[in-house]
Amino acid sequence: MEQLSFSKINIGLAILNKRDDGYHNIDTIFQSIYLGDSIYFAKHHSVVFSGSAPELPQYMNDMMAYDETNLAMKALRAVQTYTGCTTGGAIHLLKRVPPAAGLGGGSSDAAAMLLGLNKFWDLRLTDDELMTLANGLGSDVPFLMRGGTARGKGRGEELSYLPTGKPHWLLVVKPELSISTTAAYSRFNNESQFDSTTIDEVEKAIHTGDIKEAMKVSGNTFEELIFPLHPELQSCKKFFTDRGYTTIMTGSGPTMVVYLDAAREALTLQEEIKAAGHNWLSLITKTHGKEALA
């Protein structure tokens, strides 16, 4: 059995303040995209977990561990603890989503593991039960259980769903560096030019079905926090905006999201990236449309 995951982008992300529990309150718009991993399930007398990422660069492979520290494996253990299920399974995770990229790759694997095990082990857990497990695994996991378009508040787990329109082509571009989300948050000093009024404007554009406009009016506090530390990120964004493309950074970075009017534009941009000598991973994908979520 195969369970597909999908990843996400943030169309705007405002860090509002630090909470008493050490986390931060944010306001963001989540949008799911087709870029995703696969989890394969086969019968086995005990649980065996493995993984591979043949399509990703070696330095990304070196970052990933297919053991108890993997969020997908934590999701499996959470299911076992909650249900008492002792059934085995040979489970293989095929990674396509870059890790530590602001795309929610690990969280999407956890969501896919919950959904996949519910079918594979015939657990018959309700949507509410699955969502409770998702909430215990990470802030992005609840959104990645369902996808679509949603405004996230609190740590990102307080979701209000928005209309998902037609799909739009994107180029996601990850420079060869990784950002520690924890370290990025630690730089926040309760000041940002972006707040909930920024996200209000993004939401207005989403309601009209205009994701390009939503990206144009958005802002990301993490750009303020990490661009000064990593000039390559600023130059990466500028590479596309100088060519007239609406470009935003997703999550805590470092991945840039480039809006495309047509898929063929991605091929031209990939050639220009190569010609300029940049060692950036670029992947063509598109947002989920409402048909994909039916």
Image (tube, helix red, strand yellow):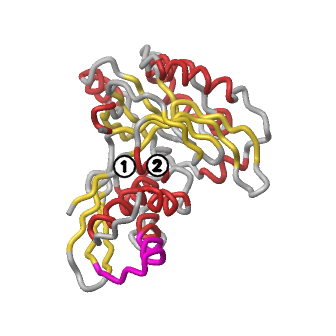
Residue at image x 57%, y 19%? Answer: 217
**Residue beneath disc 1:** 97
Q: Which dot marks residue 168?
A: none
* Secondary structure at numbered mark 2: loop
* Secondary structure at numbered mark 1: loop
Residue at image x 57%, y 24%? Answer: 218
Q: Amino acid at mark 1?
A: Val
Q: Nearer the viewer, residue 42 or 162?
A: 162
Q: Is residue 232 visible?
A: no
Report whether 157 appears left or right of 59: right
> Can you tell which quarter of the image residue 243 is in?
top left
> Can you tell which quarter of the image residue 203 is in?
top right
Q: Is residue 22 visible?
A: yes
> Can you tell which quarter of the image residue 59 is in?
bottom left
Which span is picked out in magenta? 76-88
**Residue beneath disc 2:** 104
The spot of residue 286 in percent (x, y) is 32, 32
141 lies above or below 222: below
Q: Nearer the viewer, residue 57 or 147?
A: 147
Q: Are marks 1 and 2 in contact (CB under 8 Å)?
A: yes
Q: Amino acid at mark 2?
A: Gly
